[in-house]
Image (cartoon, rainbow, N blue to C red):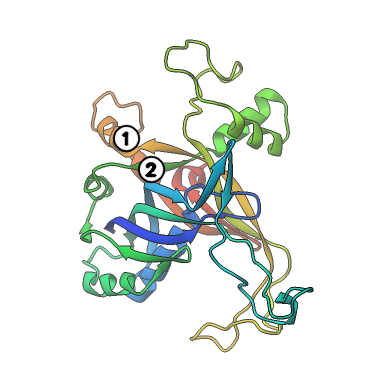
Amino acid sequence: MSCFVVIPYIKVQAANFQSNGLIMGGAPLMAAAMFSHHLARQIDEEDLGFYYVHHDIQPLGGEAYGRFTPAQRRGATFIGKTDYSSKNKYALSLQPTASCHLLFSLVIKFKDARRPDLDTLVQTIKRSKFAGGHILEFGKIQDFNDAEDALAQISSGFLIHDRNDLLTAYQKAYQVNRLQAFSQLLAHRPQAKNSDTPILEHLPNENLAWLSATTLGYALLEQPTADRTGIRHADDQDETQHAYAEPLTGLIQYHSLNSILNEIRLETSIYPDGYLEQIQWSYHWIQDDVFLLQQNQQIDN
């Protein structure tokens, strides 16, 4: 037995909007995974997975002619000789950033079926950050023994679905490489409501609405080492290993939470039994140098 803890309607101010060097926007799933792990450690529990429910996102910046320009809210992140302007020794150079306000809900699955210490959890969240942003407020935290009951406490929103299957199918159907499949799928517009013509001729049953991209993992570029100047060590370790890594970008899709909950309750549901378990996110080292976020349906496959 496990326990599902619902943290509804978390409002975050000035969170990181840049998922990696190529992507701005997209659900911050990696931040949600590490936030869940952080909370679990604080209450002496083991986190087994999570559901991220998107409500709203407000990018901070301006938009003109279809191009978004992020507001530069901060100056230099690092302070050193090389951070100063070459022309003005008193002016710090600008470290580009992209920020946003977030509203989302989180359902975290803990290993132990016993009721977690919710009071400690509340106090931990109040002094924590999410994706570098300040947590302004959140709703009443509750715990349940079932994922469906937990998600039903959130009245609206969008669950996030891993679309690696669509990426692979498109790549094979159109005989393109991985990067071409990724960029072409994101560039497609969804099918018009009154149109009977499928967007993808070779994949006519695929729905392209609400596709997006985000960071789903990291691949190490070197062997981990503790022999590096200036690195930080964990409080409970004499030495903490570090390594440079590159982000792994994945294709995701937003699905209505209410539509999924209503559908799985039907006797003739289009979803298989245990569907909510299949779309739960969790993180793993799938090999020694690759850390990946996956849904259970990808792990089983």
Residue 33 image point, x, y percent: 45, 60
Residue 12 image point, x, y percent: 38, 60
Determine which quarter of the picture holds residue 291: bottom right
User: Which residue is located at x 38 percent, y 43 percent?
Assistant: 159
Taking 283 as reference, is 277 left or right?
left
User: Which residue is located at x 47 percent, y 18 percent?
Assistant: 192
Mark 1 Cα-neighbour bin, 10 Å: few <14, some 14–19, many ≥20: some
Determine which quarter of the picture holds residue 63: top right
User: Which residue is located at x 57 percent, y 40 percent?
Assistant: 64
Identify residue for label 1: 260
Does 90 appear above or below 38? below
Identify residue for label 2: 159
Mark 2 Cα-neighbour bin, 10 Å: few <14, some 14–19, many ≥20: many
In this view, the residue in front, 198 or 217, is: 198
Report helix, strand or loop for mark 2.
Answer: strand
Does 301 appear above or below 289? above
Residue type at the position of mark 2 = Leu
View extreme (bottom): residue: 238
Taking 285 as reference, is 82 left or right?
right
Residue type at the position of mark 1 = Ile
Taking 234 as reference, is 53 left or right?
left
Does 79 appear above or below 104? below
